[in-house]
């Protein structure tokens, strides 16, 4: 099993390289050179050329890429922004924790609730609980998070002032205030995946409950909670896979949620970078996102291997 | 029926929900198992024998329910039992093994874990003690290298070994009754013999009563003390194994026995019973076997046949000798 | 007859979804004739007026009729997501079919590697980043001018290819080994013919189901990307950029600016999901585990 994981990890690394190369090529392929963008339309050709020499942009794309990669691998250095001159790594480090916290909280919320709801829905099939969960799931999947955010802000932050309408209060300013500021964003971020995962949990669990080995478990006289665990060990495998992917995707949607709530997370960095045509930063941020996505999927694979070693062996 | 009976089933009706109604697939079954004896329950697929067993264990699939009748175990009415009482019985006093060992064991857990959980569900022992007991059980059912095997997953074992593990699971808490639902049907003939031998050995060593369910007459003849024959949800004949096979009193039993190939039988086409068993939706009135019976009379389809007794043997047929 | 249509859609849910989808398509195609007002017409005197008889959905900060803008916005959303699915479908089905049918070759191997690599990309991030890098602005091709959203739909289409290719590939792989294919080969029919006339139809049903999911996701992605200003450019309306404007008016109580565009997004997604679920039941009774994710 360790061999299989090593292979997956190696493969993911390859994907990461491929993706980064793609991105690199694209940023170098657009007609406007970075020098022109930074110095503006009025700068002379010489000034642009000098700028390019200063930033190593006059070398061939291959060489630039190699330098960038070696920078990351050897020094952990994601390069320097052409526009601001600041280190890309620093910029990311400033804003990543905020986004990370939002996503983690939303993810935990989504997982916990979807597990409970999906399980209840499957066990209490065709009852009010089941219908209720399924209705909420359909709505959760269809209502876009950022619109829900606007509605909730209007309802709770403007009319009733239960929650702040935006901004991010850091932990240092007080635990309750911090919590207050993240309730709405994390709810809006997590609701979609809560819906998706609860549907998956329900259908997977229903599938498993009908299997022969569940009948054996009951025939052995196991306590009801243990029978449920027996079922979940099998039913959760596809759910864990999707959950891993969801974590990565959530990072993407956090972008939009941060925009609605005016939160200074990674998305703010990305959108500002795009506005300023700061490609080094764009590149760095996208690489971080991709890296997180790949890591989350690997983590899901590991979790599955623990949960149900047979699947892990079969997939190898 | 004496008070010594371990298991007593009286007038059991089990139905499946079809739309708004309940359609009975088991229609008035009487059964009894005394301590230490082996009762064979024989019938074609769809005769209701497996459902009867599941009803006893209260493990009916969703949509099925006991519509009437009584099931008593050691004098206790199982219809009155709540879930925790049933859980104590299941795996504790009544063990059950199923047909397909491949799908009957949880693929996600090693067998040592499954055995350990089963043991600790009924006995208050530590995990380590449970694992030791599990190892003993594996040795008992004839699995080589039991200590290493505890860590194995079901898919790493052969079909025969899996069935042995199932048996170990079912007898792990010293039940007084073992219900075996077609335990050898999914296995090769050679492995079949080994598993039959194992069941016999367990029965002899521990005095466990066995309700052996099968459509295979020969296996039942080998192992059972008494036999009950079911057709289309009803008991058509029951009695001691030797008398039943020597002098079957019901046309169905007679035709069944005739169908079993014998070494000393002549050559030529093998006899079969013409026709098919009735579907649940279209159960005929009167005797369910009448449409396929060689000696059926008009009254067989008009009224339900009576139960005719000849000593210990019962046959539900107008034409049975009493 | 009604019963036949309902069962073709896979049940009542599917039927409702199909009806709503139909409305959406009509809206998209007939926008110029259905919209009561010019969506770009500025009328500052009537700015920010609540819904009334003349303006059913009210007016926005520039006095433009919200209902008309919503109708035109629907057109933009559907255009982007439908065309993206089309691109992804053609590319994905084509590649998947070739890889699955002529399996064992270099095409299959390289395709699988590329697909795996592309699968590690979170869709929304890439859509935003790539559109951002390319820059915001109209696109000029062959003398025609297209809006900025064309970049988005092209990118989405390309990003959809892996999922659709994978589904086609898996089905085609299974079908290629089937007996009827071998029989056709023995008849002397060329591989290409078999692939197109026999294997392709069988691959279509799972692809159609996945395509409806991608259609739904596409609408939300277009709205999101327009929301952050990288999609449909003002003054042209998109449900997303209308919500971006509405954000400035959350505190002043002009609720109609946020409610209507967002409700339309939700309704469209519900419709497509209902239709997709219905189609899945109608075309392929076995449930696949393809979840709704982006």
Image (spheres, grey):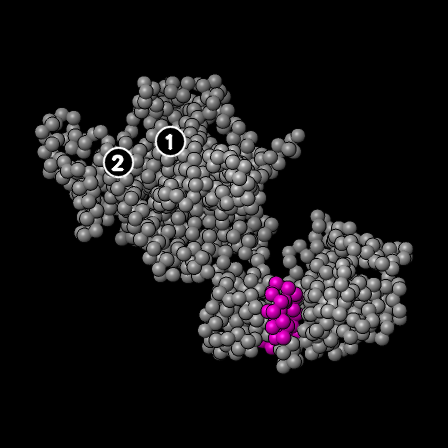
Residue sitting at 24 percent across and 37 percent down? A25
**Local crowd at mark 1 within 10 Å, few (<14), some, or many (≥20)?**
many
Tag 2 secondary structure? helix
Q: Count how many numbered circles sit on residues in the image.
A: 2
Residue at horizontal 52 percent and vertical 63 percent from the top: B106
* Image position of B75 (left or right of A122): right
B308 versus C217 height, above or below: below
- Looking at the rendered image, the disc whose residue lies closer to the viewer, 1 or 2, is 2
Residue at (81% x, 65% y) in the render? B254
Q: Residue C153 carries which label?
A: 1
What residue sits 30% from the left and 48% below the top?
A14
In this picture, is B253 found above or below C73?
A: below
- The answer to whether residue B108 is seen in the rendering is yes
Report the residue marked by disc 2.
A26
Residue B190 in which image quadrant: bottom right
Tell me which segment is drawn in magenta.
B172-199
Measured from the top left, where is residue C101 in percent x and y?
45, 41
């Amino acid at each position: 099993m360790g061999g299989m994981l090593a292979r997956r990890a190696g493969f993911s690394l390859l994907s990461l390289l491929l993706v980064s190369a793609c991105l690199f090529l694209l940023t170098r392929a657009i007609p406007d050179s970075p020098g022109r963008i930074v110095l503006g339309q009025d700068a002379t050709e010489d000034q642009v050329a000098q700028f390019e020499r200063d930033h190593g942009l006059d070398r061939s794309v291959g060489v630039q890429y190699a330098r960038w990669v070696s920078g990351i691998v050897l020094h952990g250095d994601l390069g320097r922004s052409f526009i601001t001159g600041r280190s890309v790594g620093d910029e990311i480090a400033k804003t990543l924790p905020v986004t990370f916290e939002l996503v983690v909280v939303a993810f935990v919320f989504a997982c916990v609730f979807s597990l409970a709801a999906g399980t209840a829905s499957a066990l209490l099939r065709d009852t009010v609980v089941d219908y209720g969960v399924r209705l909420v799931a359909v709505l959760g999947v269809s209502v876009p998070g950022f619109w829900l955010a606007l509605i909730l802000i209007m309802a709770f932050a403007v009319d009733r002032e239960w929650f702040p309408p935006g901004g991010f209060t850091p932990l240092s300013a007080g635990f309750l205030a911090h919590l207050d500021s993240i309730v709405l964003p994390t709810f809006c971020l997590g609701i979609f995946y809560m819906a998706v995962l609860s549907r998956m949990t329900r259908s997977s669990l229903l599938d498993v409950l009908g299997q022969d080995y569940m009948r054996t478990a009951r025939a052995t006289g196991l306590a009801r909670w243990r029978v449920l665990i027996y079922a979940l060990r099998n039913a959760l495998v596809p759910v864990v896979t999707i959950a891993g992917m969801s974590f990565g995707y959530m990072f993407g949607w956090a972008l939009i949620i941060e925009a609605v709530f005016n939160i200074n997370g990674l998305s703010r960095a990305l959108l500002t970078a795009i506005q300023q045509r700061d490609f080094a930063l764009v590149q760095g941020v996208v690489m971080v996102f991709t890296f997180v996505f790949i890591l989350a999927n690997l983590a899901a694979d590991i979790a599955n291997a623990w949960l149900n070693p047979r699947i892990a062996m079969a997939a190898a | 029926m004496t008070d010594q009976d371990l298991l007593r089933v009286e007038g059991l009706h089990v139905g499946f929900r079809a739309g708004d109604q309940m359609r009975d697939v088991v229609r008035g079954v009487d059964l009894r198992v005394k301590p230490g004896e082996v009762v064979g329950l024989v019938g074609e697929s769809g005769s209701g024998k497996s459902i009867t067993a599941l009803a006893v264990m209260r493990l009916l699939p969703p949509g099925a329910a006991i519509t009437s009748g009584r099931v008593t175990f050691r004098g206790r009415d199982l219809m009155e039992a709540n879930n925790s009482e049933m859980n104590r019985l299941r795996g504790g006093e009544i063990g059950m093994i199923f047909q397909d060992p491949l799908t009957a064991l949880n693929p996600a857990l090693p067998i040592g874990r499954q055995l350990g959980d089963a043991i600790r569900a009924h006995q208050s022992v530590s995990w380590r003690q449970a694992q030791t007991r599990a190892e003993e059980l594996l040795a008992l059912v004839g699995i080589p290298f039991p200590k290493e095997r505890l860590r194995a997953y079901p898919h790493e074992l052969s079909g025969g070994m899996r069935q042995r593990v199932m048996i170990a699971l079912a007898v792990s808490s010293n039940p007084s009754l073992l219900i075996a639902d077609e335990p050898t049907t999914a296995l090769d003939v050679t492995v079949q013999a080994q598993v039959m031998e194992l069941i016999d050995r367990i029965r002899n060593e521990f005095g466990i009563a066995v309700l052996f369910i099968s459509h295979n007459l020969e296996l039942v003849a080998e192992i059972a003390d008494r036999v009950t024959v079911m057709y289309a949800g009803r008991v058509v004949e029951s009695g001691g194994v030797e008398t039943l096979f020597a002098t079957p009193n019901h046309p169905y039993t007679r035709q069944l026995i005739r169908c079993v190939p014998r070494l000393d039988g002549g050559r030529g086409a093998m006899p079969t019973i013409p026709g098919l068993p009735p579907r649940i939706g279209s159960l005929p009135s009167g005797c369910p076997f009448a449409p396929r019976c060689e000696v059926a009379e008009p009254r067989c389809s008009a009224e339900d046949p009576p139960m005719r007794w000849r000593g210990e043997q019962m046959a539900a047929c107008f034409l049975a000798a009493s | 007859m009604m019963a036949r249509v309902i069962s073709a859609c896979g049940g009542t849910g599917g039927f409702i979804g199909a009806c709503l989808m139909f409305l959406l398509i009509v809206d998209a195609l007939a926008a110029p004739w259905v919209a009561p007002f010019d969506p770009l017409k500025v009328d500052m005197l009537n700015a920010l007026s609540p819904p009334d008889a003349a303006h059913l959905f009210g007016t926005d900060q520039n006095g433009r009729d919200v209902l008309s803008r919503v109708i035109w916005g629907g057109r933009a959303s559907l255009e982007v997501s439908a065309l993206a699915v089309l691109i992804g479908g053609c590319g994905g089905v084509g590649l998947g079919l070739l890889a699955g049918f002529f399996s064992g070759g270099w095409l299959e191997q390289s395709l699988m590697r590329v697909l795996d690599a592309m699968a590690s990309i979170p869709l929304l991030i890439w859509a935003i980043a790539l559109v951002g890098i390319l820059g915001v602005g109209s696109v000029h091709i062959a003398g025609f001018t297209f809006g900025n959203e064309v970049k988005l739909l092209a990118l989405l289409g390309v990003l959809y290819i892996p999922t659709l290719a994978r589904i086609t590939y898996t089905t085609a792989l299974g079908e290629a080994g089937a007996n009827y294919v071998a029989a056709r080969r023995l008849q002397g029919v060329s591989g290409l013919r078999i692939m197109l006339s026999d294997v392709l139809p069988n691959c279509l049903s799972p692809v159609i189901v996945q395509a409806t999911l991608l259609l739904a996701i596409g609408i939300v992605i277009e709205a999101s990307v327009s929301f952050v200003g990288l999609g449909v450019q003002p003054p042209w309306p998109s449900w997303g950029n209308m919500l971006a404007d509405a954000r400035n008016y959350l505190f002043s109580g002009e609720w109609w600016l946020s409610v209507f565009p967002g409700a339309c997004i939700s309704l469209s997604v519900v419709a497509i999901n209902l239709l997709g679920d219905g189609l899945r039941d109608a075309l392929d009774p076995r449930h696949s585990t393809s979840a709704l994710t982006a």
